[in-house]
Structure formats: C-alpha cells, structure tokens
C-alpha cells in the first residue's frame, strides 16, 4: 500500500504499531521519540479495507481514531487517598485513557498508585511484584500520552525529583529544509556541515577541471620539451639543391629548412649518404599510414614484427 516496513526503529520511522507496551521499542519511543506516532494494529487493517475498496483514506482521521491510548491494557488500583473527589478523578483518568480501574487489589493488577509506602495494599503489591508508583506517574504519563518508566516515580524519591528525565519534552522539527537551526546539538550538525562543505569543494574542483579542458589550458603541457621525440623520432631528412654553380645536380643531407624538394634519383650523388630503403618505399606507398614514421621501443623481436607488418601493409 505504499508504506515501508522496518524491523528496526531507525531515525526515519514515523509510525509504531504497538501490541505490547513492555517492549524496548515502546519504552524508547516513550522517552526519546515524541515524533513517532504510536497506533493500534487496527490502523493498518482500516487503511487496507479502504484501499481494497478504492477509496482515498483520510490518514489523519484514521490516526486519531486508532491512536494508542496512554494507559493501554493497564489495570490500576489506588491506595492512601482519602479525598473521594480526587479518587474519583483518578478513576476517570484511568478509564478514559485505555486503562481499567480496579477498586480491589488482585494479582492481575499491573500498577498500584500509592500516596505513601504504607498499608495492606502496598504490602501485598510488593509481595506480588506489582509496580508501585507515585501519583506523578499517572499525571505525566497522561501528559506524554504513553506509559513512562515506573522506576523514576518510586515513592522513595522526593516529590520534586520524581519523573526527572522520564521523557524528552520537545516537539517534532517543523522548520524548513532551507533554513537550518543553529540552536540544536552542534555535535549532530557538525558532520553534516562538514560533508556539505567537502561536497561543495569537490564540485567546484570538478567544474574547474572541465573548464580547463574546454578552454585549452592543457596546451602548455602538450608543448613541453619531449626528449623522446628528439632521440627516437628524428626530424625527417630532406634534400636541398646546392647553390654552387659547379655541381648543380649534387645535393647534401640537411635538416628541415625553408626550401626543400622531394628527393629523387637525379638528386642523389655518390658522396651523399644512402637513403633508407624502407623510408624510400614508404614515401611511394599509399594508405592510411602513408608518410607515418613509427618507432617501437621496449618490445622483443616477435612483438615488433606484428605492428610492423600491419603498418607496411596499410
């Protein structure tokens, strides 16, 4: 139906379906997660029926109807309160919030609210391992909307100290994502801010990198002095006619200059160095590698023959 079920109570959980209030998840939500909505299992079934009937459900209305009562499945007894009006108020508070008020203390009672650690009900509650709490436990549990830790409301604790840190009184964050609050826990916000800063720096470096490529800033690196080109790929030799009138048909081997002509048999003289036969053959070939000078370095004889054959035959 579009929701995500999780076995673990992670930070992104929004709803907790409760079947038992004695579980660690329930107790953790009661103390630490006021943003999580605790609901009865009927909530899922109600949405499922509307979904099967192809009816758009009113989620908020269903959440209100299936909200887990504050005193869900509790059986509460009281002792030590002489004021009948106050006792009646305690009875109504229990019955109106999912609990069941018991006038008599029996073994199936879950909580005994006592004014002081005295009396027969108090003695039997201790013997039967029934949880004995002060009246502040009921008041603050109703304020929280969930059952709070009973150990923090022991009668031995001074009234002013009862319920200290029983639950975190904070509202769920409703601030805009574009405006982060700096009043919260700096330890929690620090890593996120660091990751955002690092990400921004990385993005800026990426943009600068591609800008350099597009703008051609790497040309200087391509124009750097290349010792391999000098040692292994010498300049192409050219033949130049001598200006001497005595021997017009005699040429000399020189480096590339401003005036050169294509070598031919008529330009060669007995005193000139012989032209490499392979280079001469290459000049006369036509193909994709015509005029290309290829130098292979660091390969054995077998590996040199393979590319050489392909170059000469292409």
Image (cartoon, helix red, strand yellow):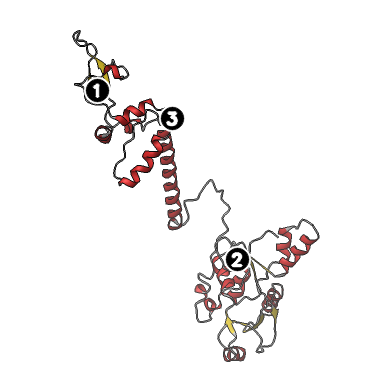
Above or below for 289 versus 265 = below
What is the residue that sits farthest to the top in this orientation? 245
Q: Label 3 vs label 1: CA separation? A: 26 Å
- Up the image or down, 32 lies above or below 138; here it is above
Residue at 66% over, 60% down: 3
- Local crowd at mark 2 within 10 Å, few (<14), some, or many (≥20)? few
Q: Position of residue 14 (x, y in %)?
A: 61, 61
Q: Nearer the viewer, mark 3 or mark 2?
A: 3
Residue underneath mark 1: 255
Residue 76 location (% of width, % of height): 66, 81
Q: Residue at x 41, y 41 (%)?
A: 205
For the residue pair 181 and 143, the one nearer the viewer reads as 181
Quick check: marks 1 and 2 in contact, CB under 8 Å?
no
Looking at the image, tell me whether mark 3 or mark 1 is earlier in sequence order. Answer: 1
Instruction: Mark 1 or mark 2: name the one nearer the start of the chain.
Output: 2
Question: Based on the displayed image, in which of its 4 quarters is residue 237 positioned?
Answer: top left
Left or right: residue 197 versus residue 30 is left
Res 6 label: 2
Cα–Cα gap, marks 3 and 2: 67 Å
The residue tagged 3 is 287
Q: Earlier in the sequence, mark 3 or mark 2?
A: 2
Q: Which quadrant of the rendered structure holds the N terminus?
A: bottom right
Find numbered disc 3 in the image and state the secondary structure of the residue it sits on: loop
Comparing 121 with 47, the one in front is 47
- The quadrant in which residue 169 appears is bottom right
Crowding at mark 1 (Cα within 10 Å: few <14, some 14-19, many 20+):
some
């Amino acid at each position: 139906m579009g929701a995500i079920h999780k076995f673990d109570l992670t930070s992104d959980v929004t709803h907790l379906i409760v079947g038992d209030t004695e579980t660690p998840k329930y107790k953790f939500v009661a103390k630490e997660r006021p943003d999580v909505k605790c609901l009865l299992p009927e909530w899922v079934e109600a949405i499922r029926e509307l979904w099967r009937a192809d009816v758009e459900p009113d989620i908020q209305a269903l959440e209100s109807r299936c909200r887990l009562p504050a005193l869900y499945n509790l059986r509460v007894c009281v002792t030590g309160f002489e004021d009948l009006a106050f006792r009646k108020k305690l009875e109504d508070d229990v019955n109106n919030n999912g609990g069941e008020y018991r006038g008599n203390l029996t073994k199936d009672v879950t909580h005994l609210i006592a004014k002081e650690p005295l009396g027969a009900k108090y003695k039997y509650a201790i013997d039967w391992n029934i949880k004995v709490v002060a009246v502040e436990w009921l008041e603050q549990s109703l304020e929280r909307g969930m059952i709070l830790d009973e150990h923090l409301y022991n009668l031995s604790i001074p009234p002013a100290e009862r319920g200290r840190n029983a639950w975190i009184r904070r509202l769920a964050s409703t601030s805009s994502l574009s405006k982060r609050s700096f009043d919260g826990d700096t330890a929690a916000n620090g890593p996120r801010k660091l990751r955002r800063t690092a990400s921004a720096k990385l993005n800026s470096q990426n943009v600068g990198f591609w800008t350099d490529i597009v703008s051609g800033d790497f040309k200087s690196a391509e124009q750097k002095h290349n010792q391999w080109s000098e040692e292994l790929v010498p300049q192409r030799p050219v033949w130049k006619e001598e200006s001497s009138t005595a021997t017009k048909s005699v040429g000399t081997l020189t480096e590339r200059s401003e005036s050169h002509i294509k070598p031919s048999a008529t330009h060669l003289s007995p005193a000139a160095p012989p032209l490499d036969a392979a280079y001469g053959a290459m000049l006369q070939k036509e193909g994709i590698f015509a005029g290309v000078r290829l130098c292979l370095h660091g390969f054995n004889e077998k590996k040199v023959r393979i590319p050489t054959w392909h170059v000469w035959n292409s």
